[in-house]
Amino acid sequence: MSPAKRLALVLAVLAAALLVTGAVALFVGSAAISPRAVLNALAGRAAPESVERVVTLSIRLPRILVAVLAGGALAVAGVAFQALTRNPLAEPSVLGVTSGAAFGVVIGQSVGLGWTFLEAAGLTAFAFAGALLAAGLVYLIAAIGRELSIQTLLLAGVIVGIFFSAAITVIISLLDLNRLGGVIHWLLGNLAPIPPRALAVFTLCAAVGFWLVARRARELNLMALGEETALLLGVGAERLKLTIFVGAALLTASVVAFAGPIGFVGLIVPHALRMLLGSDNRLLVPASLVGGGIFLLLADTLARNVVAPAELSVGVITSLCGAPFFVYLLRTRYRANL
Amino acid sequence: MPPKLLELDRVSFAYPKPAGRRAFALSDVSLEVGAGEIVGVIGPNSSGKTTLIRLLTRVLEPASGEIRLDGASVRRLERTELARRVGVVPQSAPAECPFNVGELVLMGRYPHGPGRYFESRQDHAAARAAMEATGVLELADLPLDHLSGGERQRAFIARALAQEPRLLVLDEPTAHLDLRYQVEVASLLRRLHRERGIAILLVSHDLNLAGEVCDRLMLLAGGRAAATGSPEVVLEESLLSSVFGCDVVVDKGEPGRRPLVRLTWRA
């Protein structure tokens, strides 16, 4: 089968799985609404202010959209960071980039940025600046000569992550106490529905980030041979690294700005897909976009229902899955390299 | 006279000097490789052999002098253009490479269509021909990690051939190989040269491999060309003994056979 056909097949299967997951997420939840009522609401036959209409169209549907978008963006950012650093365990939250972006968002919120189109864009810009700052710091700490050693990079990521988490706590302590509850919920990773304008900004930023990464997927494959070999094959390695760096930071930042710092999606999804599809980034990048959406949607549906009528933050679920998965990868697949 | 395929014209280079470390350098090195010629660069470790390759592939820029391909300075060539003319088999491949042989060889097609997301049908045909030429076609679906040292080396040669270069550059192609694979690589190079008319620049500290395969040799010592000429001229006892710092004996053999270098072991 030609690679193009294989990609089309993979995307078709994943899209079908996403539709099924989306349907499930739409029909289950803490509000007891019958499937028939959900269908009525979807078809526009429910009364304007009825419970089924509000829950289905204003709560569940937007939440599904945010989950799919955030999951896809985080998974693609994970593939990008893994290829960029040639480190299979790299991922936005492990590298501290998520914490940096969260720090940016908290600063943005403390100066009063809200959910209008411009303010949402401003918030993303703060998150992006924070992500770049954290990633730059990690790189500076970990770069020894031309090599990025796997262990040093991970340690640098953890250290930078701890630092920004502490900085966030400082700012929150200075904030108005009445707003604290919302911030803490957001800090755990929270897919609460966001206004359509904010969703538009989110989609736009994630799309730009995805485009930056996806169109260089073939070059990312060549980078796996080492930077010098990639150069010998005609890849402008410096420019490629910068593009991927910016793209991955933007993907991470947009998620953090609108859904909070959700960890480990960029580790779990790309590795699961790699086991199924191999290491070709041209398959992996688009497949991660859809696969990440499926994964985070599943995690969020679980988070909404497992302790109903209360709900867990989705970030708690991903971390509960992600941390053991990280240990598994560390102990089995990459032991030899560490 | 048409310009040579590759010309190094009095090229010098020095690495930025880290404190307390020796800076390896090349000074005033000139070398020509004609179309379809096999030229060897030999010399002890850190004599500048790999630096020479990195200069002619523009990984490094020379401090002075000029490197030309078909008469044009390599500085003016796009990297992809350079990669379509010169294929390099690097000395060491990454320890962990997640791709299979076929995927690796297809990567050699990148410079022929850097804007493409997937390779074209011609790309697949060229990769297949390269794998046939080096005898790794039946290994195409195997992961690189499952190959023996010799198979791995042939896979990397196939990747360089898929670039369809006019000049193939090999950096220590037999360095970590068993004797049997060393012979295999040597005969592969000769066959490629014969069948494809490809020019080869072979960089090696294996004097006998270089003497056996190459038309001409350059002996590097401490970044300078100690001698350039036919194997009979360069593989000379007193010259090699002084450059390598140990006693060697050169068997000149019968006429028509290449000289053979032997170490003499002291008690």
Image (cartoon, helix red, strand yellow):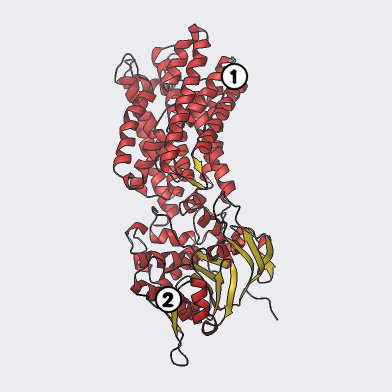
Q: Name the quarter where the C terminus of chain B is drawn.
A: bottom left
Left or right: where A232 falls relative to B134: right
Which residue is pictured at 36% across the width and 66% down the height?
Answer: B151
Mark 2 and mark 1 residues within 8 Å of each other at the beta carbon: no
Residue at 36% from the left image edge and 28% from the top image edge:
A318
* Residue kind at label 1, given as amino acid type: Thr
SS for callout 1 = loop
Residue A174 point in image, percent of width and height: 52, 11
Chain under disc 1? A
Q: How many marks?
A: 2
Percent across and percent down for residue B251 are 43, 86
User: Foreground residue, A75 or A1?
Assistant: A75
Residues indicated by labels 2 and 1 sit on the same polypeptide chain:
no
Residue B186 — which label? 2
Determine the residue located farthest toward the bottom in the rendered image. B255
Give the class, few, some or many, for how many residues have Cα within 10 Å of label 2's Cα (few <14, many ≥20).
Answer: some
- Give the residue at x 42% y 33%: A94
C-alpha gap between disc 2 and disc 1: 69 Å
Residue nearest the viewer, comparing B81 with A69: B81
Picture disc at residue A162: none
Viewer-proximal residue, B259 or A49? B259
Between marks 2 and 1 in the image, the one whose residue lies nearer the viewer: 2
The image shows residue A6 at horizontal and vertical percentages of: 40, 51
Q: Amino acid at mark 2?
A: Ala
Left or right of A212 on screen, residue A260: left
- In the foreground, B214 or A111: B214
Q: Which part of the image, by quadrant, shows the N terminus of chain B? A: bottom right
Q: Which label is found at residue A116?
A: 1
